[in-house]
């Protein structure tokens, strides 16, 4: 059965952290819906790039997905964090041991929800204290950390590593290695 992922965007989302994982997952044959948490499909990302989502959050069925992805960007993370429907479903995915992934500032959402307490994680260096304060076992060295069903990554420069880690989680290390070789990373 093909895997399916929802990648959430909002005004202020960091462009590379959204587009790179979506691209890599699609190259790996994983179905990706880019989902806006705004009331409209079009968002303005952190560097002014306009992105049009495939869907708006109110129109999706969360149970259709195997994993949820949160890209960072300070304002984008704030907008994702203010969406109660998204957070309720992140909690449900966590409780059901389904995959959740976040990069840059977005792991703070998981931390503040209590999902990283006692779990290995990483994030953008500017947000490490939020993870520490909420009980995460912070890994400051690794670009990407996978702990069970939770994948976290540091920042825009680790977007390829983040995408490859998600491919590995969903399809296995062999598929991730083949994709990595194909893109010459």
Image (cartoon, rainbow, N blue to C red):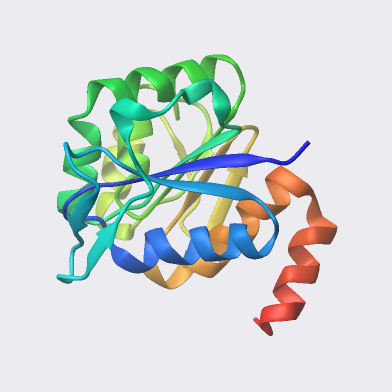
Asked which quadrant contains residue 17, the reply is bottom left
Front-most of residues 120 and 17: 17
**Would residue 142 be seen by someone viewing this image from the given angle?**
no
Residue at 54% across, 59% down: 162
Q: Position of residue 75 (x, y in %)?
A: 15, 51
**Quadrant assignment, res 142:** bottom right
Residue 140: image location, x then y, percent: 46, 57
Q: Quadrant of the C terminus?
A: bottom right
Q: Residue at x 21, y 53 (%)?
A: 42
Question: Please, is residue 118 above or below residue 107 in the view?
Answer: above
Q: Quadrant of residue 102?
A: top left
Q: Quadrant of the N terminus?
A: top right
Decide: is 95 above or below 34.
above
Q: Is residue 155 above or below residue 102?
A: below
Q: Where residue 141 appears, x then y in whole percent?
A: 51, 62
Residue 165: percent from the left, percent from the top? 63, 55
């Amino acid at each position: 059965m093909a895997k399916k992922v929802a990648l959430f965007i909002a005004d202020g989302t960091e462009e590379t952290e959204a587009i790179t994982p979506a691209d890599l997952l699609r190259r790996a044959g994983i179905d990706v819906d880019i989902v806006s948490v705004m009331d409209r499909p079009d968002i303005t990302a952190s560097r002014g790039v306009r992105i049009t989502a495939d869907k708006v959050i109110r129109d999706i069925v969360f149970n259709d997905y195997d994993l949820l992805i949160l890209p960072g960007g300070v304002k984008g993370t704030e907008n994702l964090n203010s969406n109660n429907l998204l957070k309720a479903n992140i909690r449900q995915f966590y409780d059901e041991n389904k995959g959740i992934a976040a990069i840059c500032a977005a792991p703070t959402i998981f931390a503040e929800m209590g999902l990283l307490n006692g779990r290995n994680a990483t994030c953008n260096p500017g947000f490490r204290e939020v993870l520490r304060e909420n009980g995460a076992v912070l890994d400051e060295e690794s670009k990407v950390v996978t702990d069970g069903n939770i994948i976290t990554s540091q920042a825009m420069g680790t977007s390829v590593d983040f995408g490859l880690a998600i491919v590995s989680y969903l399809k296995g290390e062999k598929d991730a290695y083949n994709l990595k070789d194909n893109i010459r990373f």
